[in-house]
Amino acid sequence: MTIFSRIVAGEIPAHKIAETDDYLAFLDVMPTTMGHTLVIPKKEVDYLFNLDDELYMGLMAFAKKVAPAIEKAIPCKRIGVAVIGLEVPHAHVHLIPLNSMQDMNFNHKIKPTQEELAETAEKIRSEL
């Protein structure tokens, strides 16, 4: 069971942004920028391109609904989208508030406090 499946199961706390029966969006605890959000299917599938078409298209549609809320809540030029697929063996999409290309640098992480993450999650949720 991946760390993301454990978040879905409620075994590990997360700063949730949005949730449906099939998908979950929550803040990355090791973000490249404040507001960096992970969007996942609740069904554990290792690789994005192994998702069946319906789950894949649903994941992207769910991400498309979450991204504008992030953009309204976090001052940025746009929301970047990244799929790396190496960190956690559970398909996921990164939605990252961008002001420069450096904001997509996964070798540069910020270390927000739990309180800062909670405040950020609330700001984003209020825009949904």
Image (cartoon, rainbow, N blue to C red):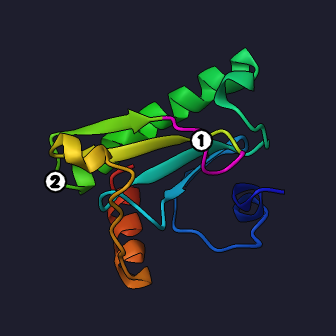
Label 2: few (<14), some or many (≥20) within 10 Å? few
Quadrant the N terminus occupies: bottom right
Residue 28 among magenta residues: no
| Predominant SS of the magenta segment | loop
Q: Which mark is residue 92?
A: 1
Q: Secondary structure at mark 2?
A: loop
Judge from the rendering whether residue 73 lies leftward or rightward of residue 89; answer left or right.
left
Q: Name the residue carrying label 2.
A: 75
Q: Nearer the viewer, residue 110 or 74?
A: 110
Q: Identify the residue shown where x is 72% and y is 44%.
A: 21
Measured as percent of width and height from the top left, residue 124 is found at 36, 57
Q: Identify the residue shown where x is 51% and y is 35%.
A: 83
Label 1: few (<14), some or many (≥20) within 10 Å? many
Q: Identify the residue shown where x is 45% and y is 65%.
A: 30
Q: Nearer the viewer, residue 77 or 68?
A: 77
Measured as percent of width and height from the top left, residue 57 is found at 61, 21
Judge from the rendering whether residue 120 lies leftward or rightward of residue 58; answer left or right.
left
Q: Amino acid at mark 2?
A: Pro
Q: Amino acid at mark 1?
A: His
Residue 87 among magenta residues: yes
Of labels 1 and 2, earlier in sequence is: 2
Looking at the image, is mark 1 or mark 2 nearer the viewer? 1
